[in-house]
Image (cartoon, rainbow, N blue to C red):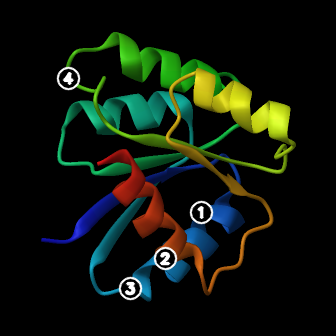
């Protein structure tokens, strides 16, 4: 069964890069969402193994989106990782404290992103 991943970012170019890089792995099905609100709607429909959330987004940032996901019984157990340039140790620990399974550093390497996603999912399981 493929690993179903939702990538959430307000930047269309970044969503496209992530979608393309994850599609290089035949065992990953990637979807994208342009906002925290869209991610919440998509998550409610189920069948997600991991959500990758950009931290800095207008209207509803990544940490706020994670809070909403955790507050809903239907989405509370979906593993979430943040994607951010803010990767100092104390920042990563803060994101883990919010309930994230990990952090993907921006800029990321598109050639290794699929393996990073697999590792995050394995850690969450």
Q: Position of residue 95 (x, y in %)?
A: 66, 30
Residue 123 against residue 66 in the figure, above or below: below
Q: Nearer the viewer, mark 1 or mark 3?
A: 3
Within 10 Å of disc 4 (Cα), the crowding (few <14, some 14-19, many 20+) is: few
Compared across the picture, whether 88 is left or right of 11 comes to right
Q: Residue at x 80, y 66 (%)?
A: 107
Q: What residue is shown with label 3?
A: 25
Q: What residue is shown with label 2?
A: 115
Q: Secondary structure at mark 1?
A: helix
Residue 12 against residue 21 in the figure, above or below: above
Q: Residue at x 18, y 48 (%)?
A: 47
Residue 99 against residue 110 in the figure, above or below: above
Compared across the picture, whether 68 is left or right of 59 comes to left
Of callouts 3 and 2, which one flags the residue occurring earlier in the amino acid sequence? 3
Q: Position of residue 118 (x, y in %)?
A: 41, 68
The answer for how far apart the CA atoms under marks 3 and 4 are is 28 Å
Q: Are marks 1 and 3 in contact (CB under 8 Å)?
A: no
Q: Secondary structure at mark 2?
A: helix
Disc number placed over residue 15 in the picture, else none: 1
State the residue in front, 106 or 44: 106
Of callouts 1 and 3, which one flags the residue occurring earlier in the amino acid sequence? 1
Residue 56 visible to an observer of this rendering = no
Q: Secondary structure at mark 3?
A: loop
């Amino acid at each position: 069964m493929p690993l179903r991943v939702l990538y959430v970012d307000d930047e269309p170019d970044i969503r496209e890069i992530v979608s393309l890089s994850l599609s290089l792995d035949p065992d990953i099905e990637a979807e994208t969402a342009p906002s925290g609100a869209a991610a919440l709607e998509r998550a409610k429909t189920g069948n997600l193994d991991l959500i990758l959330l950009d931290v800095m987004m207008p209207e509803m940032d990544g940490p706020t989106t994670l809070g909403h996901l955790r507050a809903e019984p239907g989405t509370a157990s979906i593993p979430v990782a943040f994607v951010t340039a803010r990767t100092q140790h104390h920042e990563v620990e803060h994101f883990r404290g919010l309930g994230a399974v990990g952090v993907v550093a921006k800029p990321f390497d598109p050639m290794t992103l699929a393996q990073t996603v697999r590792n995050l999912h394995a850690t969450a399981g």
